[in-house]
Amino acid sequence: MSVANNGPTSPPQGPPPVPPQGPQQPRWAWWVAGIVIPVVGIVVTILMSGSGSSDDKSDETTGPTRSSVSTEPTGQEQPTPSPTKSTAADQVLYGPGEVTADVSEGGAVYIELDTTEPLTAHNTDLKGADIIYQASGDAPGLDVPDSASHLAPLPASDSAPTAEQCIEAVERNGVYAADAKRGADFCLLTGEGRVVHFRVVAAPPGRGIGKLDVTVWETPAA
């Protein structure tokens, strides 16, 4: 018995081929990623927090601060108070020092007190003289040139007056002539406005050598 040959026999068909797949990540890689990502997030958060804190401190540092200095405007300087008579005239220019007036041969001695040191001239009309010491009778006399009432006798005192007291004495009791008696005190204003105090240390009656203890202060401010 023959079998009919119906053509070539096809080989048996197996299951369909599986398409190739890429390499698969091992399990430990996912485990590491699960740890690293949160750690990175924490680090970034810390860094950002630190940066914000630094910015805050920087703002505090560079922001306006209160000054302990007075807030009064400094553009205008406070006016300096003008000197009073006392402070302006308290600068001593000369003395206390002795000035000698020799009238042993009579006549008069002219005394200039507006110079660095007192100048004297015997029987000479010294230009700018401030007081004249002259022999006259029993007691020498003191005269102010041009009869200016710039001489003031002072009451007896153990202490010398201040410049201000001298100014006030001349303003109240100024005269142009007085007797030069030993121990007498006088205040005087010079031709240039200086303030003078002098005490008669020696005044022989009639003729002799007179001596004055003199102090000269600066001209007071107007």
Image (cartoon, helix red, strand yellow):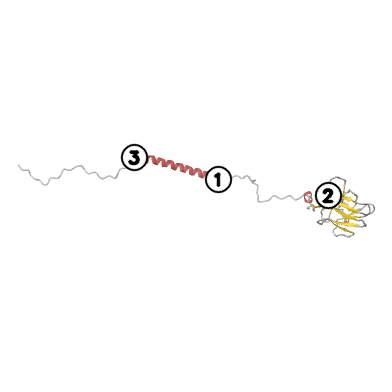
Q: Nearer the viewer, residue 151 or 205?
A: 205
Residue extending farthest left: 1
Q: Secondary structure at mark 3?
A: helix
Determine which residue is flagged by label 3: 28
* Separation (CA) of disc 1 from disc 2: 63 Å
Residue 90 position, x and y percent, is 79, 50
Q: Secondary structure at mark 2?
A: helix
Q: Residues within 10 Å of mark 3 (few under 14, many from 20)?
A: few
Mark 1 and mark 2 lie on one chain; the one further toward the N terminus is 1
Residue 83 position, x and y percent, is 76, 50
Determine which residue is flagged by label 2: 166
Residue 189 position, x and y percent, is 84, 53
Q: Amino acid at mark 1?
A: Thr
Q: Please state if 109 lies on the left or on the right of 73 as rendered.
A: right
* Separation (CA) of disc 3 from disc 2: 112 Å
In the displayed structure, 32 sits above or below 182; it is above
Determine which residue is flagged by label 1: 61
Q: Residues within 10 Å of mark 1 (few under 14, many from 20)?
A: few
* Separation (CA) of disc 1 from disc 3: 50 Å
Mark 3 and mark 2 lie on one chain; the one further toward the N terminus is 3
Q: Residue at x 46, y 43 (%)?
A: 47
Q: Amino acid at mark 3?
A: Trp
Q: Secondary structure at mark 1?
A: helix
Q: Residues within 10 Å of mark 2 (few under 14, many from 20)?
A: many
Q: Nearer the viewer, residue 80 or 54?
A: 54
Q: Which quarter of the rendered picture does the N terminus lie within?
A: top left
Question: Pointer 3 and pointer 2: residues touching (CB < 8 Å)?
Answer: no
Mark 1 and mark 3 lie on one chain; the one further toward the N terminus is 3
Residue 32 position, x and y percent, is 36, 40
